[in-house]
Amino acid sequence: MRPRSPRVLAAAVATVLGLVTPSVDLATAQPKPIRIGEINSYSGVATVYTFPYKEGLALATKEINDAGGVLGRPLEFIHRDDKLKPDEAVKAARELVLQDKVDFLAGCISSGVGLAISAYAKDAKVLYFATHCQTSRLTWDDGHPYIAHTTNNVNQYVRVAARKASTLPITKWANISPDYEYGHNMWEEFSTYLKKLKPDVQFIHQSWPKLGESDHSSYITALLQSGAEGIFTSLWGAQSIAFVKQARPFGLFEKMRYVAPSVGNPDELDPLGKEAPVGAIVTPFAWYDAGLQKRHPQLEGWTKKWIEWAKAKGLKDPQPKLGASWGYASAYIIAEAIKRAKTTETDKVIAVLSEGFDMDFPWGKVIMRGCDQQALPPQWIGVVKLDAQGKPIATEIEEIQGKEVVRSCDEVKELRAAAAAKQKK
Amino acid sequence: MDFLTGLFPWITNGPLILIQVMSGLSVGMFLFLVSVGMSLIFGVTRIVNLAHGSFYMVGAYLMVTLVELLPEHSMSFWGALVLAPFGVAALGGVIEMTLLRRIYHRDPLLQLILTFGLILVIGTLVLLAWGPDNKSVSRPEALAGSVRVFGQPFPSYYLVVLALAPVVAIGLWLIFYRTRWGMLIRAATVDREMLGALGVDVATLYTQVFLFGSWLAGLGGALSAPTVAVALGMDGDVLTTAFVVVVIGGLGSFAGTFISALLVGELQSFGILIFPSVSIVLLFLIMAVVLIVRPWGLLGHPEE
């Protein structure tokens, strides 16, 4: 064989180098991130919930990316402020999809915002992960393939509260809830499920202060005279604190058993301090509870990690609140769905979600149910007490799995059929 | 009578009626305290101060901080209650002198836009200064409980408010009708050009009125703080109610504001018993009726 001329050799080397160079480039350059447009309320009243939530997302994202990302690509959340307005949210969603070319949408704290983004996602055929709002309508009545709900919905924790209420020696119930969709939805779910579990209950008094009412005195005096033995409420946040502060000196909580899902969270218990409604039945994320920590051995370590992270990020209250755990879980659930689909293609990720999967978190197993793409996390119910230092906490924590109480896939089908029939009319 | 008791089972329940009257009164007194400053500022400067709710909110937040800062003592609550409104008055003074003063003669729409802008700015500053978490002020130890009124427990703190609001109302009346300054203010509400022509420094008078109105908003916020959650968003909730109370009473009439606050408090209190499901619209229903019958409000004067 004749040795090749140096020119040919040089050309060959050049060709090989030419072929190699781009792949060297690929190895050193950052792979393209998976981008998720995240829309939530980052100014004003909702920040008490969304700031910890956003840091929860950030902590999980950092962990995921430090461990090599998803499909070898880093996860990236692009945040937008919806100012609690559905039209702002849809505008942001459109921009994120059309201009920023995000792969998925996520976010929401207001149910109205969540439903608006969901409607947009359905039209635009973009997959939307509802991460923070809680209305059951998202995945049930108004459900469709382009939405997945990565946190609790109202139905699960209200039913857990109703189940607890059914074990009490109380038959006469009253309601005080804010007069808007969430309040009516909560009371409807609570009263029908309680009636189903305990047919002899009576609902004898209802009051509907407006959302954000600051003075409930007249509602309280009317409640006191109603003869009810138990009160259910879906008041939340600042209004819930105000109601408790106003009702306490009237002796309401000594006269009647208070069932108040949201009052067990530190956002409400801590400001109430010694004025907390001792004995109230609540559905809290009681990360400090010894029983819960024993049941979930990783919870304590996660709590420490979170507190460090929150302090480093400058959160004024670094406690691991419900929102923090939801943000954290949501990022992991989104990552898991993409991992299982082995692609970011919308249809394939939806296929994975519609099959469903389970994931373990420091606070227990979260089921992503396939039929409605709805998360079924563990639920907790407890009772408010003052600890030795006089600080209010939730105790006697019982854990109930969401799947034990939530409406079944068949019931969801009925809801969707009813909603579709209503729309046709 | 049988018909009545069938329709309203509470009508023979004397203690209930009396306690509803009391709670309606206390609701009304709070309403008066938070809205009278708005009425005063409008009466003199003709500015609808949409930032009034924001001043109320700052008063409540200052209360939180002052109660924390002052040494633990049974009197520290009262110390904070005295100081907090002055903090708000100072804020109001600065805003009047730097911003509002420039727009008194402009289009009312511009004035609305400016005070609306202030809501957003103050809201954001409060978020930056105090953070997003809900805060709370405890009632002073002696007033944390309740006393028996007509055999029913009634919060003792509300009794203090029930006593204090009339004191404020009488104090205002004395200032308006028994001092020279009050006379000037009344004159300014009637004809400010003429007052200026008579050699009164109207600009300073406006600043003083705005300071005083802000002080009242701060007092309302500080007094309400122990009965609510001190949180972002309390500005908007209070603004709507205060605005409705002021409109019903007649913009600029402080006696009208007092009557309207009591009326709204009582009607709300009994509305809850009679039509529990429509109590949300009751406030606006009252306003609509008053505006149809007397478009200038109960004690207001028609604009020429």
Image: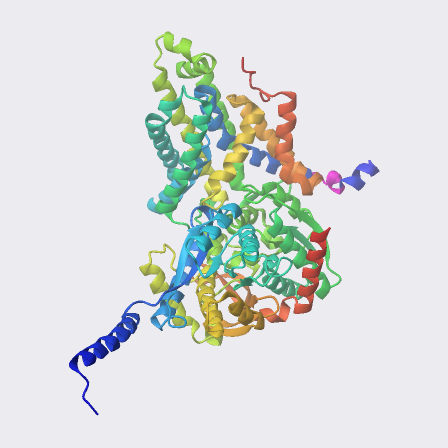
Residue A70 lies in the magenta-colored region? no
- The N terminus of chain A lies in quadrant: bottom left
The residue stretch that appears in magenta: B9-14
| x and y, in percent, of residue B157 in the image | 51, 40
| Depth order, front residue of A96/A46 | A96
Q: Residue at x 46, y 58 (%)?
A: A266
Q: Is residue B28 visible to the viewer in this orientation of the structure?
A: yes
| x and y, in percent, of residue A421 in the image | 72, 56
| Depth order, front residue of A144/A59 | A144
Q: Is residue B151 left or right of residue B257?
A: right
- To which quarter of the image does residue B103 belong? top left
Q: Is residue A170 left or right of residue A138?
A: right
Q: Residue at x 51, y 68 (%)?
A: A349
| x and y, in percent, of residue B132 in the image | 41, 50
**Majority secondary structure of magenta residues:** helix
**Outermost residue to the left:** A6
Q: Is residue A266 above or below residue B232?
A: below
Residue B11 lies in the magenta-colored region? yes
Q: Is residue B181 above or below residue A106?
A: above
Q: Residue at x 34, y 68 (%)?
A: A31
Q: Is residue A308 above or below residue A213?
A: below
Q: Residue at x 60, y 59 (%)?
A: A136
